[in-house]
């Protein structure tokens, strides 16, 4: 069937609108974190350059969310991209500093790390099964745990690795437990909910997102 000029025009407008939602300042800032994380693969761990690039990545993690809120450009794609960027950054960093961590950290840290990973996977599975969505949660405890995890590489060499990792794992465990309770008791998926005690979403179009979650479909 032939495509009319009107239909083609509407299609072009829709593509442009979708593109404008993806190519935003917050998402570009998040992309800097991804690029920096990839660059860390070829940089000597614990070197000044390593810490410099790592610090830029960390600053972008706080800046993208702030810019998104100020410009009202929050989106499901942005939250997903932010979570992917964090995963890449911390995975690369973990692999780079792993030899030092193995020799300097206590055994109980590794046991706790395994338990924390299992808890986080349980959160992903809960949201995926219950709401049919990928979990890109950004609670206050998530933010706290991200900050503490980010600081871990700065604590390894001075000899405070157990303390740094312990505090990060404590916050990460608390965040996962809170989210299990929060989403387990909720009848709808609210990506902007910041804590177990907050009842309203912190993002625009919250009601539509919650409604979509209740129906089990993507926004």
Image (cartoon, rainbow, N blue to C red):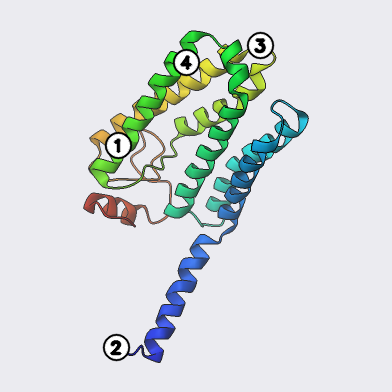
The residue tagged with tag 3: helix, strand or loop?
Answer: loop
- The quarter of the rendered structure image containing the N terminus is bottom left
Query: Where does label 4 land, which residue?
Result: 110
x and y, in percent, of residue 29 in the image:
61, 50
Q: Residue at x 70, y 38 (%)?
A: 53
* Disc number lying in front (2 or 3): 2
Q: In the image, is 184 to the left or to the right of 45?
A: left
Q: Give the mark nearer the N terminus: 1 vs 3.
A: 1
Query: Where does label 3 land, which residue?
Result: 159
- Residue in front for this viewpoint, 134 or 190: 134
Q: Residue at x 64, y 40 (%)?
A: 57
Q: Give the mark nearer the N terminus: 2 vs 3.
A: 2
- The quarter of the rendered structure image containing the C terminus is bottom left
x and y, in percent, of residue 158 in the image:
70, 14
**Tag on residue 156?**
none
Q: Give the mark nearer the N terminus: 1 vs 2.
A: 2
Real-space Cα separation, disc 4 to disc 1, in angstroms: 23 Å
Real-space Cα separation, disc 2 to disc 3, in angstroms: 70 Å
Query: Where does label 1 land, which residue?
Result: 125
Real-space Cα separation, disc 1 to disc 3, in angstroms: 36 Å
Query: Where does label 2 land, which residue?
Result: 1
């Amino acid at each position: 069937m032939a495509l009319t000029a009107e239909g083609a025009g509407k299609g072009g407008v829709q593509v442009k609108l979708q593109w404008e939602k993806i190519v935003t300042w917050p998402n570009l800032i998040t992309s800097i974190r991804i690029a920096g994380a990839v660059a860390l693969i070829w940089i000597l761990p614990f070197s000044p350059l390593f810490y410099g690039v790592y610090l830029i990545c960390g600053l972008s993690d706080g800046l993208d969310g702030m810019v998104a809120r100020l410009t009202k450009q929050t989106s499901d794609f942005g939250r997903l991209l932010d979570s992917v960027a964090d995963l890449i950054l911390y995975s690369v960093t973990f692999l780079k500093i792993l030899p030092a961590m193995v020799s300097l950290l206590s055994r109980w840290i590794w046991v706790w790390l395994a338990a924390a990973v299992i808890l986080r996977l349980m959160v992903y599975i809960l949201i995926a099964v219950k709401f049919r969505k990928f979990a890109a949660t950004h609670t206050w405890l998530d933010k706290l745990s991200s900050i503490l995890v980010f600081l871990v590489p700065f604590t390894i060499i001075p000899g405070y690795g157990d303390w740094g990792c312990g505090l990060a794992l404590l916050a990460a465990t608390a965040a996962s437990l809170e989210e299990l309770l929060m989403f387990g008791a909720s009848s709808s998926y609210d990506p902007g909910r910041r804590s177990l005690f907050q009842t309203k979403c912190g993002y625009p179009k919250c009601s539509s997102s919650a409604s979509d979650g209740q129906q089990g479909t993507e926004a």
